Every structure is written in C-alpha cells, then in structure tokens.
Amino acid sequence: MAAARSLTLGIDEGTTGVRAAVVDDSGTILGLAYREIAQRYPRPGWVEQDPREVQDGVRLVVAQAIDAAGARPSDVAALGITNQRGSAVLFEDGGAPLGPLITWQDQRTLARCEALMRQGVFASPYTAASKYEWLVAHHARDRARGSWRLGTVDAWLAHWLTGDAHVSDHSNHSVSGVYDFLHGRYDETVRATFGLADARLPGFTDSSAVIGTTRPDILGAAIPVAALAGDQHAAMYGLACLEPGTVKLSLGTSGMMDLNAGRSLSAPGPGAYPLVLWSLDGVRSFCFEGNTITAGASAQWLRDGLGFVRSLDELEALARSVDSTGGVWAVPALQGLGTPYLDAAARGMIGGLSRGSTKAHIARAMLEGVAWRSGEVFAALTASGGASTATSLRVDGGAARNDLLLQMVADATGVPVERPSTVESAAVGAALLAGRAVGQWRDEDVAARFRPERTFEPQLARDQHAERLDQWRRRIELVRAAGS
C-alpha cells in the first residue's frame, strides 16, 4: 500500500451514476467503486435525480473505493469532485436539498428559454440558469430569501461535504448560463433576467485549490476538498491534455470531444462552442467542445432495441465476425446530429441493405458511423483557432474499450488514437487536480507520466480517406433531407 496521506480521491458524480477512484502518487487507480443513480421522468422532457440518493451514493462509493485500496479515510491527502455540468440543485445551509436535482438534459424550461432567445437573450435549457429560476419559483417561494442556496452539482456536494464552502470552479461556471467569459465573473444582466440578482449563488475558485475539509461524520475523516471541475475538463487533465492543440474524445453515451485552446478566448469551428477548460493558479485556459450526441447510445440501441447482443462486451466480436460492412452503412443520428451540424431534427438511418446483410454487417456499419461522426467533430475543432497542429487523439469512456471502434476512429480522423490503461479519466483527473493543490505533483509530472496502453494508427491511405469521406457526406445529406 502507498504511504499514508499519499493517496488522493476523485469523486465523479455523473448523469447515470457516481464513481470514486483512489489514486496513488503515480496516478494509478488503487481502488474504484461505482453506484448507479436512478433518473426520474415525472413529465415528458423532465429529467431529475433524488439528491439524497446522490449523497448516499457518494458515501457508499468513497467507502468502497478506499477499502478496495486497502486504505483508511485518514490516508487520503485530498479529494476532488467532478460532475455532470449544467445541472442544478437548491439546498439549505449544510447541504440538505430543497427540491430535485434537475439534470442537464432536462427540458422543462425550454419554452422559457425560447421566449428569451426571441428577446435577444441567450438562454439554453441545457445550462443551469433557467433551472435555478424554476427551482426558486417552485421550491423556495415560501422561504426567506437568505435561507437557501443554489449551485451546480460540484458546488452543492462541496458545501455538503465541508459544511460551509459555497464555490464552483470556472469550468462549471462557464456552463452555467450566467457566466461572463470575458471577465471570468457573473454576467449581472443575465443574472437579473433570471431573477437571481440577489440569490445565493456559488462564488469562484480555481479548479485546483483547497476550499475546505470534509466533515468527519460524512466520509470518516477531515479530508481537504482540493479540486472542482466539470467532467469533460477533469477528463482532459486525467488524459494529460495540458498543451494547446491536444484533443481528447470521451466515448460514453455520447461522444464528447475537447481541444485545449490555450489561454486566449477565441472563436471555435462550426458547431463547436468555447468553454473554460480550467483555472490554475488564477489563470484561465479555454477549450473548444463538440459532440456526436450518439456514440455508446448506438451500441445500447443495438442491444436493447434490436436484441443483436446480450451485453455490450459482445458487440466488437459480432462486428469482427465479418471483414466489411458488405455495403451496409449507418448514420447514428438517433438523437439528432451534433457538431458541426447542430441539427436536432435529424434521425438515424441505415442503408445499403441486401438479402445478404446480417446483424454483423449492421453492427460494423454502426461502429463505422460513430467513427466518421467523430472524424467530423475532430475536423471542426482542429480547423479553428489556429489549433490545426493536433497530432493525436486521446480517448476514454466505456466505449473506448472497443478496439475495432478505436481503429475506425483513427482512420476517420487521420491521427493516432491513444488509449490509457484506465478509461476512468474524469475521476482520475479530479484526483490529480486535488493532488496538485496539496503539492503532491505538478502539471509537468502529470504530463510526463502519461503513457498510452495502446495506440491505434490510421490505416487508410489519403485517397481512400478522401473517397470514404465523400461517401459519408452524401449519406449525411440523405439523413438531413429526410428529417427536414
């Protein structure tokens, strides 16, 4: 076991569950635990979680991860929190929730946001701002103004764990909908628009900084809370994407791709958006982000919707049972097309079918579709802001365990795809950011230690890539025309 107080802990509160990882001073996971968190759908378009279930889950997975590492809570030098972004919680002093945890996918404020957009005010139901407004109207109307607080998931968990801290880092603030990107503070005009001018919103902190210590009655020891970061941002740190131009792809339910854009705020490519990557030692760095919307979800559909496999672990073997798609192609736009199109009306399409087509051909075509969508996002991100020097792509997430998919992504992007030994990069990144704050290591140490477990090199010749890309673009045109 590592020496006492040399361990750090990452808590990853995600959309579908909460994970904890205990990391040693080399960045290796010694203990890992996960618990699924139920999602509730009280009305069409509404997506909630029970905050108390999240709190119970945090307690459980932290205890299990520490136990799996053969350690005690007092051996943990610091912990970091990473989280689903754009979600919102209303809570009392001390962290007791006053309503549901409204997740980022929730659409209950869509009409409100559309009305504000028609007035020239940018508003999105995917950010926290309109969720804050809804929570106050429905769960704080009979309470004194100073008796409740609002926050994104990181701010709420940090307050509950410490009992007093009420801050969020700039990466989470930048997805809140009330952030002034130019000055790194609240946009007071937008804040007033949502009726939040005098609301108790979280303050600002670096992504790697000690903000307090945990109450011993919650986790069993007084552990410094030393990092807060959004999930994609923590994954970037965990994958050591520390230099401008480095890119990562998180292959989960969706495919989230981020490019380190450096310290200057600039315009991204088509269908992408700028965010704060992190704030370290008082200095903000930015990133460009794009998404495929449907990545691992397409594999889940093949399992749950069509019954092609019983588990996702069987999908790669099924796709490899044929050496080509046999002319079958698939565009996995099951929930619309993200970057660069931002076409919510688009829907998935499978074509090129013949009497000889089998479920293996369709499975292989679906993986190819995810890869070519990833290639489009990569092209959009790397063509912007002078960051066209990206020479590789680092990956994480559950679908990154699929070797065939990663080879296809390398072919579609035209750059090597690097997979680390662990694909739990968000939790690891939170732990590493926490260790940084308490002097366990420096950024250069994190960069030097990164070693891919396997690298997938592109295998398509330039003319082959151009031909395949032209075919892909024609299929995208068919999909978009069918959805219009």
Image (cartoon, rainbow, N blue to C red):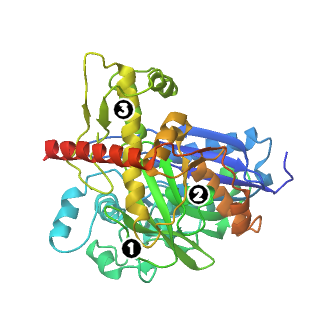
User: Picture coordinates of residue 414 (x, y %)?
Assistant: 47, 51
Q: Which of the 4 image quadrants contains residue 437?
A: bottom right
Of all residues, the one furthest to the top in this rendering is 355
Report whether 316 appears left or right of 327: right
Pointer 2 and pointer 3: residues touching (CB < 8 Å)?
no
Kindly identify the amino acid type of the residue bearing the numbered disc 1. Ala
Q: Is residue 108 above or below residue 316?
A: below
User: Picture coordinates of residue 309 (x, y %)?
Assistant: 43, 21
Q: Secondary structure at mark 1?
A: loop
Kindly identify the amino acid type of the residue bearing the numbered disc 2. Ile
Report whether 285 appears left or right of 451: left
What residue does disc 2 label? 81
What residue does disc 3 label? 365
Residue at figure coordinates x 31%, y 20% from the top left: 357
Res. 387 in view: yes
User: Picture coordinates of residue 263 (x, y %)?
Assistant: 52, 77
Residue 199's mark? 1
Between circles 2 and 3, the one closer to the viewer is 3
